[in-house]
Amino acid sequence: MAILVTGGCGFIGSHTCVELARAGYDLVVADNFHNAKEEVCNRIETLTGRPLRVYRCDVREEAALCRIFEEQTIEAVIHFAGWKAVGESTRLPLEYYDNNLSGTVTLCKVMQRYGCKRLVFSSSATVYGEENPSPLTEDMPVGQVANPYARTKLFNEWVVKDLCAADPTFCGILLRYFNPIGAHPSGTMGEDPNGIPNNLMPYITGVAVGKLPKLMVFGNDYPTPDGTGIRDYIHVVDLARGHVAAVQYALAHTGAEVINLGTGVGYSVLDVVHAFEEANDLAIPYEIAPRRPGDVTIYCADPSKAERLLGWRAEYGIHDMCRDSWRWQKNNPNGYEE
Ligand code: WQD
């Protein structure tokens, strides 16, 4: 029996594959390598010490998915595959609905056809919108989501919830991530964004490695202690271990559950900059810039449901995240290259 990991060569997917292997699970990866490099397969194999069964395919290809279920015995699926750039989604909404929504529906149809009843879905805290107060809890009404990317996450949650309502033997775990950063402590796997990074940590490491001149801090006039935005940063390895706990739960339960994966601790932009400088003994030049449209003041999880239901909580702190992010970038200044 194996766990199918769609998007298993992406940032969170690859770290989850390593943690699943450490927990003793057999893996099968499906990835179209639109947002991932094939070199990641080698890094996963090196870290797990085992060959990786990889299917190069798109989750929208029903026949390709059927082949996986014909050839492998899949007991559960973790579904990461999808496009994830907020800004891009406003420029390419149809591509986001096609990739993220059609992909999930096709996957669920094939799972049903082959009697695979356990799904862990990669959702996002962005579904809370801007009006919900932090700390955010799973029972809050989802918000006015601000972009097509976040809407695909929200619609996919409903796809899985409605499937669980129609088939009471099905289990769907919807994991709402906060801000994943950090990298595998080995320094051999990490975040490898295409082009200029949108997110804070890969931008900071780009400055640290000399590829970017300085960090632009998007606004210091928020109602926070130092005026910069506050987020709940979570180490990608903690996040990966949260997926292992979610699979273990799904294999023993039915129904749909929404679960936050965050630390419950908020750090401002300048907190992260200073933690990065302290953890790695280097300076990060920055300049205060105007606010970025769509940004909110604070986004933090209440992580208590994950601890209660999954027996999981984040263990790494912000300095670990900064140290591991830098080790990855320093060892791989051009990411996975190719
Ligand atoms: C964090 C903070 C910025 C870059 C995004 C997605 C969300 C989720 C996580 C998928 C904010 C500030 C950033 C920079 C800066 N991904 N910042 N200068 O926007 O909280 O969430 O990633 O689910 O969908 O929206 O993360 O890292 O972009 O920003 O000052 O160059 O850093 O203003 O306060 P965000 P982020």
Image (spheres, rainbow, N blue to C red):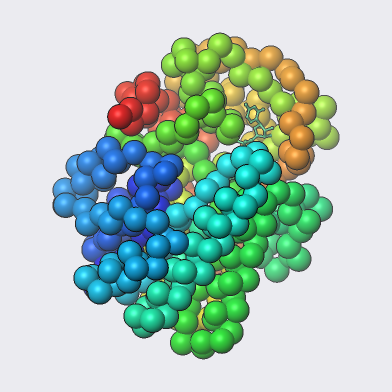
The residue sitting at 56% across, 62% down in the picture is 101
The residue sitting at 34% across, 38% down in the picture is 37
The residue sitting at 68% across, 62% down in the picture is 137
Which residue appears farthest toward the left when viewing the image?
50
The residue sitting at 37% across, 21% down in the picture is 333
**Above or below, comparing residue 52 to residue 220 in the picture:** below
Q: Position of residue 154 (x, y in %)?
A: 65, 62
Q: Classify residue 65 by image quadrant.
A: bottom left
Quarter of the image with the C terminus is: top left
**Residue 278 falls left or right of residue 41:** right
Q: Position of residue 95 (x, y in %)?
A: 57, 50
Q: Where ligand 1 lies, by image quadrant? A: top right
Q: Classify residue 59 by image quadrant.
A: bottom left
**Residue 39 falls left or right of residue 213:** left
**Residue 171 falls left or right of residue 58:** right
Quarter of the image with the N terminus is: bottom left
